[in-house]
Amino acid sequence: MSNSTFRSNCGLATGLDIIGDKWSLLIVRDLMQGKKTFTEMRLSKEGVATNILADRLKNLSINHIISFYHAADNRKTKYYFLTEKGLELYTIQLEIMRWTYKYYPDQVSDHTEFLEQLSQNTTQKIFKKYTKNYQDEKDAHFNKMNPDG
């Protein structure tokens, strides 16, 4: 996004212009949980429409939050991954989850054990653990799909 497309110079407003829509953080969540392809993300339980998913993937890519590589055996297949910038959004997701678990515990049925752990540990501690695992899995997948580098 160019500076002219942002609503203002407010840090919160600018951040929301980039990731504050209904789908972007869910795409980041899906990537963090191991989904890699358009189809895998399209099949998420929230049911994003294909045109919206394509638009959000494009926007996240333009803003260097995600990137992708093509499968070595099929150039049409893209494998998406979070960049370092994108990985840092995990802490925002953790804080939203912590807030939701605190004020809407009956709504949160998925990952209850994880949310209980989150309420007892620091976001930074969990961030380090999960982002290292994510990076290791991403690198292993890339090497598997592109054995010649």
Image (cartoon, rainbow, N blue to C red):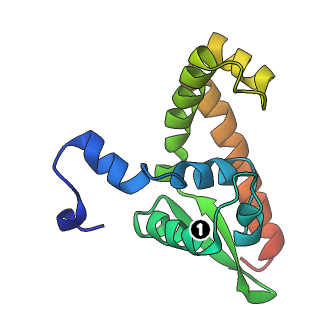
Residue 72 placement: quadrant = bottom right
Q: Is residue 36 visible?
A: no
The quadrant in which the N terminus is found is bottom left
Q: Vertical placement of 147 versus 64: above or below?
A: below
The quadrant in which the C terminus is found is bottom right
Instruction: Give 93 or 67, whichever is nearer the viewer.
Output: 93
Residue 16, horizontal then vertical, whole percent:
36, 48
Residue 7, horizontal then vertical, whole percent:
20, 55
SS at mark 1 in the image: helix
Q: Is residue 127 left or right of residue 46?
A: left
Which residue bears the numbered disc 1? 53
Residue at 67% from the left image edge and 41% from the top image edge: 132
Instruction: Give 56 or 60, whichever is nearer the viewer.
Output: 56
Residue at 59% from the left image edge and 15% from the top image edge: 102
Residue 38, horizontal then vertical, whole percent:
70, 70
Residue at 55% from the left image edge and 55% from the top image edge: 23
Q: How many labels, in total?
A: 1
Within-10-Å neighbours for mark 1: few <14, some 14–19, many 20+:
some
Residue 118 placement: quadrant = top right
Instruction: Give 110 or 118, whichever is nearer the viewer.
Output: 110
Q: Vertical placement of 20 versus 39: above or below?
A: above
Q: Is residue 42 visible?
A: yes
Q: Residue furthest top?
A: 120
Instruction: Give 103 or 99, whichever is nearer the viewer.
Output: 103
Q: Is residue 105 left or right of residue 13?
A: right
Residue type marked 1: Leu
Residue 133, horizontal then vertical, whole percent:
73, 42
